[in-house]
Image: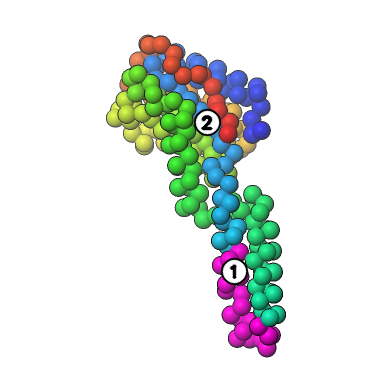
Amino acid sequence: MPISNADQARISAAIHAAEQKTAAEIVCVLARRSSDYLYVAPLWAALMALIAPWPLVIFTRLDIRTILVIQTLIFVVITLILSYPRFRLAATPRAVKRARAHRASIEQFFTRGVAGTRERTGVLIFVSLGERYARVVADEGIAVKISDEQWRCALDLLLAEVRRGRIADGFVAGIEECARLLAQHVPPGGAEELPDRIYVI
């Protein structure tokens, strides 16, 4: 587990304290990674297996049967190497990882009920460790008042601590900065609608 039960309790307490300053609802999600990228291993293996025979045909006198055996071995070996999640993640293009993490943040926004608050004042703080991705997703009642650039400060505080391995400290700092921004536009009041907790997926 990326964070301990004690750290989760600290984050829950930070959310509770933040929501005393604003009527907005804050939900946190920490993902180990946003996808398994299972298709990456066979794609890279197939590409290398298709490329490999050409130098063998041009620069060697190997017969076609031997080349086919080598081609098959290349496919199998690369697939096995990339079956390890760390290697598979490293082999996935950055743009693909960012797109998948972005999609996961939107999915979590709806899955955790952040889009269902009465005044449309839900805020999701999403971090995906494998992709090194973080995002604040705000519902329309807040998005019209606080720009992505303003959320950037909260994300910078969060990511600075996450890079040092202090995930809980990062979330607490990010939550406090989000509360400061939210308090300026969404004053306290209203009923509690969502649990004060972090979801670890």
**Three-letter code, disc 2:** Val
Residue extending furthest left?
A: 144
Question: Considering only vertical position in the picture, is 22 above or below 48?
Answer: above
- Mark sitting on residue 48: 1
The part of the chain drawn in magenta is 45-64
Q: Position of residue 154 (x, y in %)?
A: 45, 31
Between 12 and 179, the residue placed more toward the observer is 12
Q: Earlier in the sequence, mark 1 or mark 2?
A: 2
- Mark sitting on residue 80: none
Residue 63 among magenta residues:
yes
**Crowd band around label 2 with a 10 angstrom C-alpha radius: few (<14), some (14–19), many (20+):** many
Between 36 and 30, the residue placed more toward the observer is 36
Seen in the image, is 57 located left or right of residue 116? right
Disc 2 element: strand
Main SS of the magenta part reads: helix
Q: Position of residue 158 (x, y in %)?
A: 51, 33
Question: Considering only vertical position in the picture, is 152 above or below 49?
Answer: above
Q: What residue is at 34 percent from the left and 23 percent from the top?
A: 120
Residue wearing tag 2: 29
